[in-house]
Amino acid sequence: MRVLHVITRMIVGGAQENTLFNCMDLIRDFGDEVKLITGPTEGAEGKLLSHSSIDGLEIEVQPSLIRSIHPIHDARAWVALKASIRDWKPDVVHTHSAKAGLLGRYAAWNCRVPCVIHSVHGAPFHPFQNRLSRKFFVACERWAAKRCHHMISVANAMTELMVAAKVAERSKFTTIYSGMDVEPFLNSAENRVAIRKRLGFHETDVVFGKIARLYHLKGHTYVIQAAKQVCKTNPTIKFLFVGDGILREQFESEILSSGLSDRFVFTGLVPPDQVPDYIGAMDVLVHASLREGLARALPQALIAGKPAISYDIDGAKEVVLDGETGFLLPAKQILGLSESIEQLARNEGLREKMGQRGRVLFTDQFRHETMTCKIRELYVSMLSR
């Protein structure tokens, strides 16, 4: 079949990796013709696309398909999308992200594409935005939901959120977990000693890592607040921030003023293929974000045999099973975060037990081949109707 994927940006990120795996699996495993339309991919987050990753994939960069709301650019992008759809004549149009999801669905529906699918990687509305913004984005999603045949949620929590907001009926959603290449995470311990040495960690240090852009709502500030408590009593606790972003200078300044510079290491921007090595260097993953669909870092860490501490937001509870694969805490809670860090820092046996349980439960579930097979079955099911 001919499948057209539409996404706003192909930066380094979970939704983008999901989309690229889906595109390449369809080409390699099913012999499908696949095209990807993306907006400009420049940004501090880094580019995901490289010549080695896109063999056989047709790519169209649409300059007007930008993330922020801009009536003129948005109108141009919609016209360009319609023209591309009419010219390429896909059997399926599969959209990702809020802006590309809205414009892509509208264009595909207008062109009477036989199967229009949208993936919900993370809702554009959330409890931590102002009321007017939330109402606006909910209205946009309700409007766009009427212009597709089905929607894929990367976690059950995304379906619950959308149904509660009356975006669409529950029957219009299917949960398909976001896939990844699990083998590097299964083998992530191979370079542990070398990576820890390069980062300046001692072999007795217990490293709590966070993988996320240094950006608003990602929760780094809560980890820093917790660090101010736990570092008073435990000299072995260290923190590793993997990623870069606009708030790096602010975080580094706060850490310096708190006298914790020797406890934190910032990696800066890291290519996706190096993430397994950094997870291998960690002992525990800390995920303190306030808004995610289902952060890929959580199953990645668990597949690598590392327990996770996470705030109970969106899909986190579907992999961080409290007391079994890690600890699940109320959002923004500092005391609980500190206590969980201290407990896992003291108990190596508990870290090992939780990590191994996560590996057993989620390795096969998060293989990208599993994801693509389920997505393609959905395409076939929708087309057969």
Image: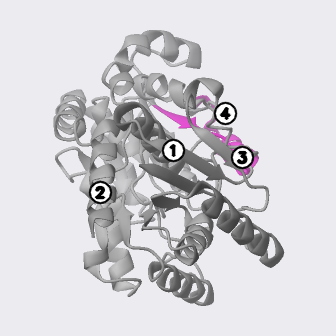
* Nearest to viewer (mark 1 / mark 3): 1
Q: Give the residue displayed 18% in from the left and 49% down from the top.
A: 323
Q: SS of the residue at dot 4? A: loop
| Sequence-first disc among 1 and 4 | 1
* Nearest to viewer (mark 3 / mark 4): 3
Percent across and percent down for residue 361 are 17, 40
Pointer 1 residue: 34
Label disc, if present, on residue 77 of the rendered structure: none
Pointer 2 residue: 380
Mark 4, residues whose alpha carbon is within 10 Å: few (<14), some, or many (≥20)? some
Q: Rounded to the nearest whole Å, what is the CA distance between mark 1 and mark 4? A: 33 Å
Position of 252 with respect to 114 (left or right) is: right
Mark 3, residues whose alpha carbon is within 10 Å: few (<14), some, or many (≥20)? some
| Sequence-first disc among 2 and 3 | 3
* Nearest to viewer (mark 2 / mark 3): 2
Label disc, if present, on residue 268 of the rendered structure: 4
Visible residue check, residue 23:
yes
Q: SS of the residue at dot 3? A: loop
The image quarter containing residue 186 is top left
Marks 1 and 4 close (CB-CB < 8 Å)? no
| Sequence-first disc among 3 and 4 | 3
